Amino acid sequence: MIDYSPTPRTPLRWLSRLRHHCILAAAALGLATAGVSAVQAQETLIAGGTPSGIPFTFLDVSSGKITGAMVDLIEAVGQDMGAQVEIKESPFNALIPSLTSGKIDIISAAMLRTPERAKVVAFSDDVYPYGEGVIVKRDHQGDIHTLDDLKGQVVGAQVGTTYVRQLQATGLFPEIRNYDTLADMMRDVSLGRIVAGIGDAPVMAYQLKQGRFADLELAPDYQQQMVGDVALAVAKDNTALLERVNASLARLKASGKLDAIFTKWGL
């Protein structure tokens, strides 16, 4: 311990200055500690996104990071909530298991709300409405208005999507092949391995707009039968986070920022 008592060799003016500097140093240390604590206290929201759901979530090969409309959306939600956002890459069919096991806090991908999924996770308010499309070769013979027009054909769908179960339920197809990505499915249509692929219409339309699979098209006369809404999803019991997310979505919708995000990505 320092003895501040005056001595013949310790002028009172010098002693006063020493005490003043000690007080300033202690105050500065307190502010620095408080700043570190504030940074450490900032919430981090871990969001699951897929590397193949162009333009909703996909891997940007130039940066090596997941990007897309749903990434922009969850980052806007995080900013509104005052939280940092970390995107964790995951195959589509592993998103819900990652959420229920606590590996991620929220799903931000092109995931439709369905009654079956709603039994396992808690969905936010709607963020984007869309349905399925049928991808075929441009020289495909015959019009396609409904799935009945493809009866007896070998078709494909992306594993983990609602389309697999819905196609099976029709009883129309002798074989339904499952694919990890829509790009893989579209490639098999192009190669003639399957007659048609059923998947998210906006995702496949975006791929076609990028000049991929020039020999393919979305069946122009097809009438969507599986229309739904994309939503964010959190753990079933995380009602506090769900309320905050919905409040942020409401503000983003009211400000026009949500529409601007999807417009940016051509949706």
Image (spheres, rainbow, N blue to C red):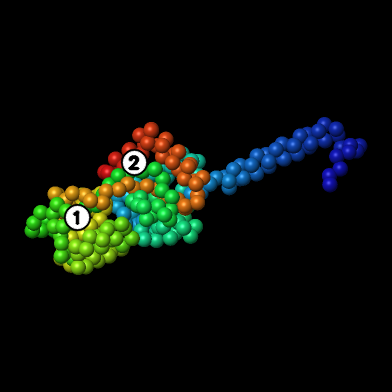
In the displayed orientation, state which residue is furthest to the right.
Answer: 8
Does 82 appear above or below 48? above
| Neighbour tally class for label 1: few under 14, some 14-19, many 20 plus, Cα within 10 Å | many
N-terminal-most mark, 2 or 1:
1
Q: Secondary structure at mark 1?
A: strand
Residue at the spot of label 1? 134
Q: Secondary structure at mark 2?
A: helix
Q: Position of residue 62 (x, y in %)?
A: 34, 54
Q: Residue at x 44, y 59 (%)?
A: 98
Total numbered labels: 2
Residue 115 lies, in percent from the top left, at: 36, 52
Mark 2 vs 1: CB contact within 8 A: no
The picture places residue 11, in percent across and down from the top left corner, at 86, 34
Residue type at mark 1 is Val
Residue at 47% x, 53% y is: 235
Side of 220 relative to 127 (left or right): left
Task: Give the Cα separation between the discs numbered 2 and 1.
Answer: 26 Å
| Position of residue 265 in the picture relative to residue 189 (left or right) | right
Q: Is residue 185 visible?
A: no
User: Looking at the picture, which amino acid does disc 2 mark?
Assistant: Ile
Label annotation for residue 261:
2
The x and y percentages for residue 256 are: 35, 34
- Please tell me in which quadrant of the rendered image residue 25 appears: top right
> Picture quarter containing residue 156?
bottom left
Q: Is there any visible trace of residue 50 in the rendered image?
A: yes
Left or right relative to 67: residue 7? right
Quadrant (top left, top right, bottom left, bottom right) of the C terminus: top left
